[in-house]
Image: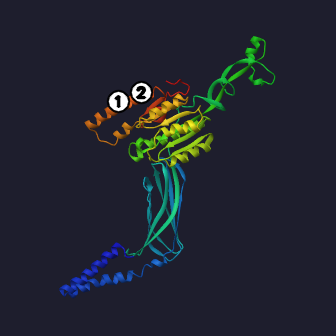
Amino acid sequence: MRSSKGFWLAVAAIMCILAGLFLASGTLVALSLPLVVYLGISAFLLDENEAALEVERSISDTRVMADDTVEVKVTVRNKGPNVELLEVEDCLPEYLELKEGTNCALMSLDAGEEQSFSYTLKCNLRGRYKLDRMELTAMDTGRLHQALIVFNQCSEFSVVARIEPTKGLNIAPRKTRNWVGQIKSKRVGIGTEFFGLRDYVTGDELRKINWKASARRDILLTNEFEAECSGDATLILDARLEANVGPIQNCAVEHGVRAASTMASKILKDKNRVGLIVLRDIIDEVYPAFGKRQFYKLSEHLLDVKPLGLLPFENVGWMVTSYFPLESQIIVISTLIDREIVITIGDLCARGYDVVVLSPSPIRLESQMLGDSRGKTVSARILGFERDNLINELGRYARIVDWNTDDPLAKALKGVDASRSRR
């Protein structure tokens, strides 16, 4: 295939010949001869059918968090004759930022030779990414002819939501079960906090005998400890189209996924069970379970969440009451644009569920997309009054947090104490 440089040289040669014939000028025709000879000789310098190249791409990690980096290494091997000039371009998907190096390279390969180049990608947005198409353009020394070779070697990696620091984040199920955990249950059991004394009975461990109290009372007394148990928490993420506000890299659903991942990590580390419900074009649910395996399962479900669908929020209420334990703490993550959510949350609270609502502020997210203007300020104030009324109404049923997404999640949830009575 002729390159753009060869094309324009051929055009120049043809124009010289036509101009010479039209003007009956042998000088112009003779001027085209060096170009014709040069193009003819260069046609034999590159045989497109003889190019035999092998390409290998490797990535440093197949699973990273948002805002982390992935290093990509590309190796090209020449299994055929010499290639005077080779241009390699590794095509990148959208939303990946080239942080270091370059995804393009120029090289010259002798027979049997291999060369490598690498670059670093910054992963700004959660999701699944594929590096597949790679274009290799083999050219002769004069860049007059080229052969395009396309490799479709798929390399996949996942970018999960970033987990924020959880220091100071104090959110846990208020109602506990008889499983060992880290929530103080105000009853005797396995724990570390002193609860009271009782008479010694045969079989009590010697290390639990309170020798000072026994000496004062002249009978053996055994220490009792406050049981530390675990509970159930269910995260409900509102990922419907009507609940989403903002550009794709800074939208309410992205902040909601980040909050869900952070809270799930924290609650699971405290030895509680965590479940998940995602409302979008379908209802995706994960039943509560313990441990790291459950966190990976939740992360996989959150990985593919995109703003989709217009399902009524009342479907979530039916799902919770039908399949999730009554003792669960329900954590709803929603912008609260849909006012019907108040009815569903009120119904869940009436049934005995402990409900916490974390609401990314849609006003702040939308304001960031608009320029400064008087109309914007007035509109924001009106919407702010409506949102305050909605939050006050919800506050009669559940604990609600109006989250400015510019603030860390731990700061927003500061003071949300699971042991505090419901308002």
What percent of the width, then of the height, locates residue 60? 54, 55
Residue in the picture at 27% in, 78% down: 12
Badge 2 is on which residue? 392
Can the viewer see residue 168 in this picture? no
Q: Which amino acid type is shown beneath numbered disc 1?
A: Phe
Question: Compared with residue 173, is residue 10 higher up or lower down, i.e. above or below?
Answer: below
Marks 2 and 1, how far apart at CA: 11 Å
Say whether marks 2 and 1 touch (CB < 8 Å): no
What percent of the width, then of the height, locates residue 193? 65, 24
Under tag 2, what secondary structure?
helix
Question: Compared with residue 156, is residue 279 higher up or lower down, i.e. above or below?
Answer: above
How packed mark 2 is, by other alpha carbons closer than 10 Å (few <14, some 14-19, many 20 or more), is: few
Badge 1 is on which residue? 385
What percent of the width, then of the height, locates residue 347? 50, 31
Residue in the picture at 60% in, 43% down: 294
The answer to which image quadrant residue 100 occupies is bottom left
Residue in the picture at 53% in, 38% down: 318
